[in-house]
Amino acid sequence: MGDPKKRRKQFQRPRKSFQKERIEQERNLKKIYGLKNKRELFRAETIVREKRAIARKLLALTLETRLKREKELLDSLKRIGVLQGNPTLEDVLVLTPEAMLERRLQTIVWRKGLANTPSQARQFIVHGHIKVNGKKLDKPSYLVLASEENTIGWYGSEMMFEKKKAPLRKGKTKQEEAQAELRKEFEEAKPVEKDEAKEQKGKKEQVKQKEE
């Protein structure tokens, strides 16, 4: 037998090891998503970093050369549910590690209400209680495809536990933020329009009184 095959490193560590803000952010994400260690977070960051790098390279190409490769990149991200609708390369450039963490089997099991906490979801998966596409899957880090999300369920008998509603994902998409801003501007403009209408109505009444 030859030498055992050396496994390819699946993540990159941060260049600067000691940054207070980054360390606190990593600690919060690790707690929110029930990650076993920071390596799982580093994997998500590495995937997003690679996708953004590809998007930047594509933007530098000519339009004809870019179209085919752009579609391949966007389709791959839509396949795992990170992007939806009709995304563009600009949507890829603003991706965050949280987008990948949301597609982990562990997170989706929690969001679907099959577990009360991410840690509990991890335990159910590792112990072989969760299936995807009818097959048992015991990898919490598995990135669930958009087509597989509705096939997630119990493998064998359902686990009995006091169910609690999983919290919704915090934060808004760029489109939702833009819509919120437009809605706010519209609501702020409403009282101004009402005041102007009242003033015009009052002026008309004054003119009528003078004529009488």
Image: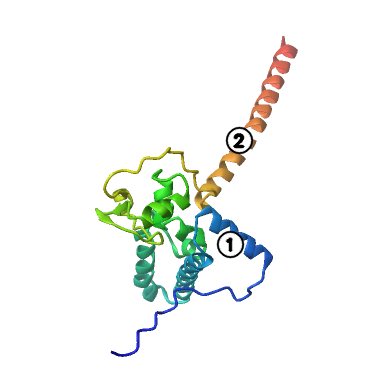
Residue 95 seen in render: no
Classify 10 Å Cα crowding around label 1: few (below 14), some (14-19), many (20 and above): some
Q: Residue 81, position in %: x, y?
A: 38, 56
Q: Residue 173, position in %: x, y?
A: 51, 51
Q: Residue 195, position in %: x, y?
A: 68, 27
Q: Depth check: 198 or 183 in front?
A: 183
Quarter of the figure that contains the N terminus: bottom left
Secondary structure of the residue carrying tag 2 is helix
- Please tell me which residue is depicted at 49% across the width and 63% down the height of the picture: 90
Question: From the viewer's perspective, is residue 204 above or below residue 144?
Answer: above
- Please tell me which residue is depicted at 63% across the width and 74% down the height of the picture: 16
Question: From the viewer's perspective, is residue 184 above or below residue 16?
Answer: above
Q: Is residue 163 left or right of residue 72?
A: right
Question: From the viewer's perspective, is residue 65 above or below residue 175?
Answer: below
Q: Amino acid at mark 2?
A: Glu
Q: Is residue 101 left or right of residue 205?
A: left
Q: Amino acid at mark 1?
A: Glu
Q: Is residue 121 left or right of residue 45?
A: left
Quickly name the residue at label 1.
26
Classify 10 Å Cα crowding around label 2: few (below 14), some (14-19), many (20 and above): few
Quickly name the residue at label 2.
187
